[in-house]
Image (tube, rainbow, N blue to C red):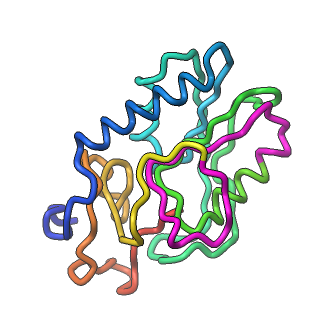
């Protein structure tokens, strides 16, 4: 993979703005869960960077666990609507306050399926915290309780979001120069989001 600058159209959200907003989210979440038990569930892999920064801002005791879900293969632009759990939780959520931590909510199809599945496990509460929200693309309504940024329908990468597995380490959210970037296996590729 070439240097990211070749594929960068613009920086959509600067590092400083990301960190300031995450600190605000941490304050909101800490206030809402004061005196309560909290379990953060990170949806892999994109949410890891957001999770690690967010949890450092929390002042309430909390635990973490991870899930991985798949709804499309590499090179696919849209969710296929079929959600498969590829890594399940190791922690019981019965009677727990659960906060799902996501990198981006796009169509909402994947997260809606995850919510429905987790509801059957009888948590005390179940809420969503997403760094990025693309409401313009929504197909399934999902309750977003904590939102970092609402963004336009653009192909984004960086800060946990990948471009075919690369560039998750970038400290900002960038927009891909779609005319320049061509997926090696599919010329119609755009970032799988949601």
Q: Residue at x 65, y 66 (%)?
A: 109
Q: Position of residue 114 (x, y in %)?
A: 70, 53
Q: Quadrant of the C terminus?
A: bottom right
What's the residue at 66%, 57% (across, down)?
142
| Residues shaded magenta | 118-144
Q: In the rendered image of this protein, does residue 127 appear above or below residue 134?
A: above
- Residue drawn at x 66%, y 41% as measured from the top left: 127
Q: Relative to residue 14, is residue 130 drawn left or right?
A: right
Q: Does residue 24 appear to the left or right of 100 in the view shown?
A: left
Q: Is residue 131 above or below residue 61?
A: below
Numbered-mark total:
0
Write the residue at 39% across / 40% down: 49
Residue 113 image-quadrant placement: bottom right
- Is the residue 143 above or below the residue 57 in the image? below
- Is 100 displayed left or right of 153 in the figure? right
Image quadrant assignment for residue 29: top right
Quadrant in the picture for the N terminus: bottom left
189 left or right of 90 in image = left
Near-viewer residue (64 or 130): 130
Q: Residue furthest bottom?
A: 187
Q: Position of residue 3 (x, y in %)?
A: 15, 62
Above or below: residue 153 compared with residue 158: below
Which percent across, then down, holds residue 123? 79, 34
In percent of width and height, residue 7 lies at 20, 70
Q: Is residue 10 magenta?
A: no
């Amino acid at each position: 993979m070439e240097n990211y600058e070749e594929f960068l159209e613009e920086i959509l959200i600067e590092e400083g703005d990301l960190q300031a907003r995450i600190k605000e989210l941490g304050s909101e979440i800490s206030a809402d869960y004061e005196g309560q038990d909290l379990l953060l569930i990170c949806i892999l892999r994109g949410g890891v960077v957001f999770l690690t920064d967010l949890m450092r801002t929390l002042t309430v005791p909390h635990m973490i666990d991870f899930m991985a879900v798949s709804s499309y293969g590499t090179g696919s632009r849209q969710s296929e609507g079929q959600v498969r759990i590829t890594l399940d939780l190791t922690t019981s959520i019965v009677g727990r306050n659960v906060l799902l931590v996501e990198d981006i909510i796009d169509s909402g199809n994947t997260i809606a399926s995850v919510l429905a599945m987790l509801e059957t496990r009888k948590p005390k509460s179940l809420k969503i915290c997403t760094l990025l929200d693309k409401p313009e693309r929504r197909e399934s309504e999902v309750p977003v309780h904590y939102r970092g940024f609402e963004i336009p329908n653009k192909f984004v990468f960086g800060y946990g979001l990948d471009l075919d597995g690369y560039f998750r380490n970038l400290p900002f959210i960038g927009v891909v120069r779609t005319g320049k970037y061509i997926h090696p296996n599919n010329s119609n590729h755009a970032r799988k989001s949601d």
